[in-house]
Every structure is written in C-alpha cells, then in structure tokens.
C-alpha cells in the first residue's frame, strides 16, 4: 500500500502542476492577445492622425503655392503695365525725333512687352508646377503611411496566429 499511495501522491501532484501550467499559459496567451490588440489599435489611431496631418500640411503648402502664384502673376502684370507706360512716354518723347529713332523705340517697346509676357508666363508655370509637386508629394506620403500601417498590422496579425 505504501508504494501505491506514494505513486498516487506523486502523479496527483504532477497533474496539479500540469493544470497550473495550462492555466498560466492560457492567461499569458490571453494577456498577450489583449496587449497586441491594444498596440494595433494605437498604431491604427496614430496612422490615421499622421495621414490627417500630412493632408493638412499638403493643403497648407498648396494654398501657399497658390498665393505665391497669384503674387507672381500680379507682379508680372504690374511690370507689364509699367513697361507699357514707360514705353508710351518714351514714344511720345521720341515723336519729334527722326523716323529711325521712332522705329528703334517701337522695337524696344515690343521687346519689353515680349520679355514681360514671357516672365509672366514663366512665373505662372513655376507656380503651377510647385502646386502639382506638392500635391504629388502629399499623395506619396499618404500612400507610404498607409502601406506602413498595413505592414505593421499584417506583422502583428501574423504573430497572433
């Protein structure tokens, strides 16, 4: 009988220890799953915030580029008006001069007008290009943030499995 009691006690204790290990492991797995879910939720929230900030920044930059375009356009227009005024005054002054001088003044006026128009066109193109580049950059940043978020969520999901 003594050996039997000994073996029953020994196996009974082993069974209790096994049950405790199983319970502890289940608790650990549950805790790990909960913490993983919290981390994923935090990542999703922070990613959404980063995307929103990137969109806001891109909108601000685009607005500033638009303002710069408008200013450049206004400055070019003012320069063209001033050039026309100066050219007109010069033309009046030269009205009493010889035909050759008048012809040269007309060429100069045309050259100034052409240069001013080219400057206005170039400023307009630069401003539009800047706006497009800002918009493209915003799209790329948002896309990269979403890809990174998806990669993180996938990695966490793979670890849970």
Image (cartoon, grey):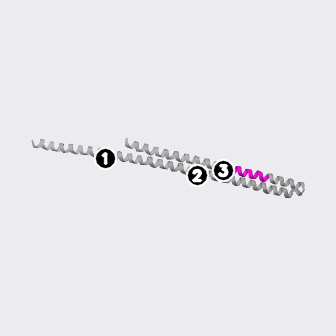
Magenta segment range? 111-128
* Residue 130 in the image, given as x and y percentages of width and height: 62, 50
Front tag of 3 and 1 = 3
Tell me residue 94's x, y (percent). 86, 57
Q: Is residue 160 magenta?
A: no
Residue 61's tag is 2
Q: Nearer the viewer, mark 1 or mark 2?
A: 2
In which image quadrant can residue 157 be found? Answer: top left
Q: Earlier in the sequence, mark 3 or mark 1?
A: 1
Identify which residue, 150 or 84, lies in the foreground: 84
In the picture, residue 86 is in which quadrant?
bottom right
Q: Which residue appears at 71% of the width and 51% of the height?
A: 120
Locate the C terminus and report the quarter of the image it occupies: top left
Q: CA distance from mark 1 to mark 2?
A: 49 Å
Left/right of residue 67 with respect to residue 33 in the rendered view: right
The residue tagged 3 is 126
User: In terms of sequence position, does the residue under pointer 2 or pointer 3 come before the other?
Assistant: 2
Q: Which residue is mark 1?
A: 28
Prevailing secondary structure of the magenta residues:
helix
Helix, strand or loop for disc 1: helix
Q: Helix, strand, or loop for circle 2?
A: helix
Residue 119: image location, x then y, percent: 72, 52
Q: Nearer the viewer, residue 102 or 17?
A: 102
SS at badge 3: helix
Task: Give the x, y percent position of residue 78.
Answer: 72, 55
Q: CA distance from mark 2 to mark 3?
A: 14 Å
Q: Earlier in the sequence, mark 1 or mark 2?
A: 1
């Amino acid at each position: 009988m003594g050996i039997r009691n000994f073996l029953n006690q020994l196996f009974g204790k082993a069974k209790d220890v096994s049950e405790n290990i199983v319970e502890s492991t289940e608790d650990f797995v549950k805790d790990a799953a909960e913490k993983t879910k919290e981390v994923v939720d935090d990542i999703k929230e922070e990613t959404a915030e980063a995307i929103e900030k990137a969109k806001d920044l891109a909108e601000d930059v685009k607005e500033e580029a638009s303002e710069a375009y408008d200013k450049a356009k206004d400055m070019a227009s003012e320069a063209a008006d001033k050039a026309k005024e100066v050219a007109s005054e010069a033309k009046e002054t030269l009205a009493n001069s010889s035909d050759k001088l008048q012809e040269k003044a007309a060429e100069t006026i045309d050259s100034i007008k052409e240069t001013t128009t080219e400057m206005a066109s170039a400023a307009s193109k630069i401003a539009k290009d800047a706006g497009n580049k800002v918009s493209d950059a915003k799209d790329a940043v948002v896309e990269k943030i979403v890809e990174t978020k998806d990669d993180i969520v996938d990695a966490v999901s793979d670890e849970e499995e």
